[in-house]
Amino acid sequence: MPKEPMNKPTFSGPNEALLRKMGGDTKHLLDPARGVYTNRDLNLQTISHIGFDMDYTLAIYKKLPMEQLQYDLTVERLINAHHYPESIRELQYDPSFIIRGLLVDKHTGHLIKINSHNQVWRASFGRRQVLIEDIQAHYQNEKIRLGDPRYASLDTLFAMPEACLFANLVDFFQDRLLRGSNLKPLQITKSDSPCQAVGFDTEKLFNDVRESIDAIHRDGSLKAIITADITTYIEDDPDLPLMLHKFRSSGKKLFLMTNSYWAYTREVMKYLLDNKLQAYPDWQSYFDTVIVGSKKPAFFSDRRPFLQLDTTAPGDGTPLEETVTQLERGQIYQGGNIRDFEDMTGIQGTEVLYVGDHIYGDILRSKKDSLWRTCLIVEELEQEIHGVLRWAFDVEKLSALDSERQETDSAIGRHRALLARMENLSTNPDFNQKGSTALTQEETEELAKTIKNFNFEIDHAKRYLKYLDRMLATHTDELERRFNPYWGRLLKEHNELSRFGAQVAWYACTYTSRASNFLRFSPVHRFKATRDTMNHDAFLSETLSMRQVRQSSGTIPPLM
């Protein structure tokens, strides 16, 4: 420990003229929305290998063009392969309607948002918001089990057009039901269908939508359109090659591991990295290992072998017959599994940082089945943080109301405890504790007066508590609607974490809005998590602060 305290450091920056000479957009270097945030301490100095997913991690898709394309192709497949009415082409995609982390209740047709305790707070039927009374009727006594096939998770950005189309089609067939029109292909044919109360088969509807959107990803039709006009659908991030170079220059080995297959991976990575830095002749030279078709999350749990690809063959390449016993730089591999990967690279689990966007495939399974450290890409984090900064006054006001509510509730509890003791003494005037004497007439009168006063204060505080609850509900709803008019904030639900927010907190060591944000940090940076607190910690912190103020004024003795 230093003998004398050090002065707190200050930081200066370049003047405006120098900033202009740097070229490009430098604002994001100071933007908190482009930071890397920490749930679990991560020391990059101990990381020898850094792996990256491709889609929505290295490759950031342009939101509206990409989602509109998926939506339109899915509609076409529903019409051609599942015989949906031609008129569903008129249903419009709304990119503002859906957020990540929602669930589909296939039995009721609801989209629902739950908190970290799996309680349903918001729901829609089609595009119409479900009233709180109806939410309680459906879900108050319903245990939401995420593994139940009744529910489908919408945790990836690829799922956004799927969810909007599902909601649009619920409205479409609900309108047909009310008009007595043909419900094909969603008419209910079984008397024991769980969708009887809805009137048409919402379970089949969701399964058809999901099969259709999976098919356009699987059959190559979506990817063919993207690669033919790649600048329309994928952002060019100038910080991406600089970030990869910075890690490589520090001695770290980089690998690419994506579920996309070779032909598509090659075109996307060429666009992102070819001819960007003179030191790298092509995109493959940034990586020590390239793995395509990795089949995550099975990569972390199964033992599929690595296959080396002959990339001179057309399409997705031809797997060679030789057994892969070593991963060589410059070669392309398909499939594989985590145990063989660690054996062939000679690394231990905690030496690996894996960066991906999929809470289940990239993060949750790697945390459950390995010791790899993780960084979750939450693209929406930029919008979420900018919203908090923009409406900082309202956020602070809400926080102050919540603190006042907790303080009032605690005061009521303390008053009730004292009141119970005084009422006991009042009804037993001769009751003596050790060292005490019976009450005098004056003390008895004073006790009765105090009890009456306490009852009045508690009754007033209870009314005030209801007033604070109404204020909190109103201000919370107003603030939440600014983030998203239907679903509120992505990572929060009222004063608790949303299910998605809780998964980010539980499973991701770090999280950020895009992979290139690591450029802001040294390759040996140590990311430190904030100190964990529980509810009573905040109360104790406030109590100790008040004690310190009173102690400095000499009104109470110091704590021993």
Image (cartoon, rainbow, N blue to C red):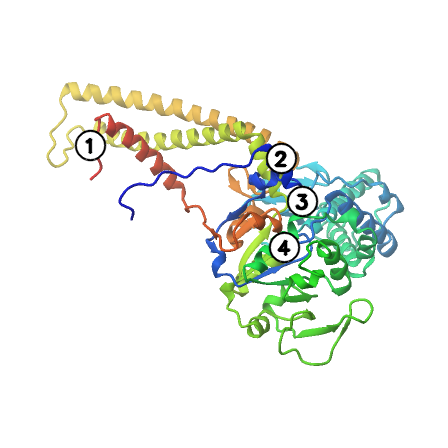
For the residues marked 4 and 3, what is the alpha-carbon distance in whole angstroms?
20 Å
* Residue density around tag 4, few if under 14, some if 14–19, many if 20 or more, within 10 Å: many
Q: Amino acid at mark 3?
A: Leu
Q: Position of residue 150 (x, y in %)?
A: 65, 54
| Dot 4 amino acid type | His
State the SS at label 3. strand
Residue 557 badge: 1
Between the C-alphas of marks 2 and 1, the distance is 48 Å
Residue 111: image tag: 3
Q: Earlier in the sequence, mark 3 or mark 1?
A: 3
- Classify 288 as above or below 169: below
Circle nearer the N terminus (4, 1): 4
Q: Secondary structure at mark 2?
A: helix
Secondary structure of residue under mark 1: loop
Q: Closest to the observer: 116 or 33?
A: 33
Residues tagged 4 and 2 counted as in contact (Cβ below 8 A): no
Density class for disc 3 (Cα within 10 Å; few <14, some 14-19, many ≥20) is many
